[in-house]
Image (cartoon, helix red, strand yellow):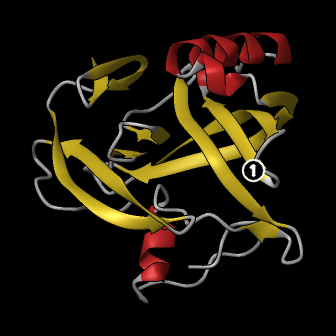
Amino acid sequence: MTALKINNRSYRDFQIPEGYQVVYDQLVSRNGKQVHLRRYQPADLPEEALNREHVTVMYDDDGFLYSYNALTHPLSGPMPDEKEAYGIAEHVWQDVDPDYRKRLEQLRILDGQTRSYVNAAGETVSFPLLWAKYANTIDYGSYEWIGLGPTSEIVEFERLNIWDYPAGRQKTEMWYGDDWILAHRGQGPQLKAPLPKA
């Protein structure tokens, strides 16, 4: 594993597995702003392979990190409790952006989630996930979270993710979700609320 690196800055809590390479780094629209969407996959998957093992990150030209999502290997073991989950999340914020952390307040643990990908044998690999979720006190409707899997492995980081209150669903584009990308391209069904429309 090596630390994620963006604009010459390393993020020690966000890991890229050995042998993974950048498949693309392209501009996409997120909350009305052009940002980079970078996708890593194993070396034997040199072209985009949706729903296979991958890491995606989103950031702007200045290196401001919006999102990190890693579906790279099976996870099993105990899930963190609330105290442990928020302890890890606070450590992440202090490393990523301690000033940004000041605008957030702890909200709640959102558990009972599952993440899945398809491995080289065509088998679906799934594992549980929980969010240490925050509310943004400056940017109305924005929520942030650190997603943790078994043995407290950091799987997700997300900030400035806007909620559409009238629609009862996420507003921010879900470029970190392969099913959303398929729907966005007209190659798959629209996702149900609370996930965003593509």
**On the picture, is 167 further left or further right than 118?**
right
Element under disc 1: strand
Q: Position of residue 69 (x, y in %)?
A: 47, 41
| Amino acid type at image mark 1 | Ser
**On the picture, is 34 further left or further right than 194?**
left
Q: Quadrant of the C terminus?
A: bottom right
On screen, 66 above or below 23? above
Q: Is residue 66 visible?
A: yes
For disc 1, the marked residue is 142
Binning the other alpha carbons within 10 Å of mark 1 as few (below 14), some (14 to 19) or many (20 upward) gives: many
In the image, what residue occupies the spot 32% across and 57% down? 122
In the image, what residue occupies the spot 75% across and 50% down? 142
Q: Decide which of 123, 21 is in the foreground and name it.
A: 21
Q: Is residue 77 visible?
A: no
Q: Position of residue 133 (x, y in %)?
A: 77, 35
In the image, what residue occupies the spot 63% across and 20% down? 99
Q: Quadrant of residue 8?
A: top left
In the image, what residue occupies the spot 49% across and 69% down? 179
Q: Quadrant of the N terminus?
A: top left
